[in-house]
């Protein structure tokens, strides 16, 4: 049982009336009558609220949450009381969210139920624990509240952004990927893999007419070509300390993991084989190139368990093991980050070794906070110095692109928020140009 603010206000008024009774007798009798009325209402509310267990609440949510996305949670509250109620509902969200505002006030009519809907956005993979649902109930009298403890404690696993993947999947099925910023790029030249011969229909390219088959069948026949298949697209994720920088609460590592998941799906829709490699101080994990729904599940499970020890990444180990495990020429998309030219030069020789056997696309990140700061107005001399440093960092990033390209390595500088779209666009562009 919990006493409400209304109860304390009523008792305070009664006390003031009793004090005033030292001077005015009518005030004393008014206070006494008010105290009796409060006692009657108090007992009545106890009877109304405690004569039965009339509240039930339950939580409905997915058994897996998607990292970096809004995940919907529903709390259903049902009343079996025959009176109107005022409720305060608190859902004990996982501590990791640091949310203190998941409290909802609502009113229920007799025998009514309502559903509360809210969203949680995790920024880190792992296991999150929900607690109980606390419901505080008072009647129209409002002098006290009865607490009900409902629902069950449950653990939710936070996986890489499969909600984003589902969104891209639906858009791909309906051929509306351009709504997410994915470009439609015309493939250069004719497709080189012959598929079949079919009857000519209006709209077919006359250059594909098969004249020998036409002569034999005495009607126009055309060759059908399909895109080259079974090329390998390997997402190589650096798990070192350079990938622990955070934007909007989520690390670069998690942005890279989400992008790798979506790109793997897009690559498989393009009839390519997708793979995932993670490394840090040593070659860490390798999901072999393949395609299919089961393979997507393997990639998702692999990416879910990726953690870092905040160590220095060893690109030499990456080179040795890539030569050992990947023999076919592939597109390697390396997600990493460089904080200056010196950081690049320490790894450049290893990237050049990789580029001898594979097509290498290095993806690294803009410092979005510094870039935003550099566009703010300058107010004093210190601001001028700070802006100069921010602009120099941006210049260094552009130099890194130039150095990589001059060594035959593709480069992509992007913001964390645009990472997925930019990587997919670059993959489609490179595939259209037969870059790998």
Image: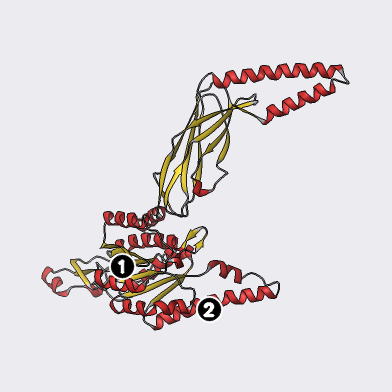
Between tags 2 and 1, which lies in front? 2
Residue 48 left/right relative to 241? right
Q: Earlier in the sequence, mark 2 or mark 1?
A: 1
Among the 4 quarters of the image, the one containing residue 331: bottom left
Q: Position of residue 303 (x, y in %)?
A: 36, 58
Residue 279 left/right relative to 396? left
10 Å crowding of disc 1: few (<14), some (14-19), many (20+): many
Please name whichever residue, 373 or 213, is drawn nearer the observer in this view of the structure: 373
Please name whichever residue, 57 or 284, is drawn nearer the observer in this view of the structure: 284
Disc 2 target residue: 395
Please name whichever residue, 76 or 197, is drawn nearer the observer in this view of the structure: 76
| Residue at 60% from the left image edge and 72% from the top image edge | 374
Among the 4 quarters of the image, the one containing residue 285: bottom left
Residue 251 left/right relative to 293? right
Disc 1 target residue: 233
Q: Which secondary structure, mark 2? A: helix
Please name whichever residue, 191 or 286, is drawn nearer the observer in this view of the structure: 286
């Amino acid at each position: 049982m919990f006493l409400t603010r209304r109860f304390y206000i009523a008792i305070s008024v009664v006390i003031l009336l009793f004090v005033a009774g030292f001077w005015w007798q009518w005030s004393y009798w008014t206070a006494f009558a008010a105290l009796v009325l409060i006692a009657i209402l108090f007992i009545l509310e106890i009877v109304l609220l405690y004569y039965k267990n009339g509240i039930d609440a339950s939580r409905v949510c997915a058994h897996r949450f998607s990292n970096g996305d809004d995940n919907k949670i529903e709390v259903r509250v049902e009343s079996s009381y025959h009176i109107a109620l005022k409720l305060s509902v608190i859902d004990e969200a996982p501590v990791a969210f640091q949310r203190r505002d998941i409290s909802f006030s609502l009113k229920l009519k007799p025998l009514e139920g309502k559903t509360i809907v809210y969203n949680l956005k995790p920024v880190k993979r792992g296991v999150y624990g929900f607690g109980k649902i606390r419901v505080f109930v008072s009647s129209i009298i409002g002098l006290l509240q009865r607490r009900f403890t409902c629902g069950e404690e449950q653990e939710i696993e936070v996986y890489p952004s499969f909600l984003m993947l589902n969104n891209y999947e639906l858009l791909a099925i309906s051929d509306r990927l351009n709504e997410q910023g994915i470009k439609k790029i015309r493939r250069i030249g004719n497709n080189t893999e012959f598929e079949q011969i079919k009857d000519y229909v209006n709209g077919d390219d006359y250059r594909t007419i098969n004249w020998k088959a036409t002569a034999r069948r005495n009607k126009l026949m055309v060759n059908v070509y399909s895109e080259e298949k079974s090329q390998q697209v390997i997402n190589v994720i650096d798990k070192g300390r350079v990938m622990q920088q955070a934007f909007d609460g989520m690390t670069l590592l998690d942005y890279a993991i989400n992008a790798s998941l979506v790109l793997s799906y897009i690559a498989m829709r393009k009839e390519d084989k997708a793979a995932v490699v993670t490394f840090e101080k040593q070659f860490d994990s390798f999901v072999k190139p393949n395609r299919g729904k089961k393979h997507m599940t393997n990639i998702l499970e692999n990416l879910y368990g990726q953690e870092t020890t905040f160590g220095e990444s060893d690109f030499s180990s990456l080179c040795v093991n890539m030569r050992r495990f990947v023999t076919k020429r592939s597109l390697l998309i390396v997600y990493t980050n460089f904080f200056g030219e010196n950081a690049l030069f320490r790894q450049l020789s290893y990237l050049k070794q990789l580029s001898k056997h594979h097509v290498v696309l290095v993806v690294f990140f803009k410092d979005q906070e510094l870039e935003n700061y550099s566009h703010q107005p300058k107010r004093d001399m210190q601001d001028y110095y700070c802006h100069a440093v921010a602009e120099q960092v941006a210049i260094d990033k552009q130099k890194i692109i130039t150095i990589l390209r001059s060594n035959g390595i593709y480069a992509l500088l992007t913001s964390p928020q645009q990472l997925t779209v930019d990587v997919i666009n670059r993959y489609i562009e490179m595939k259209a140009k037969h870059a790998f």
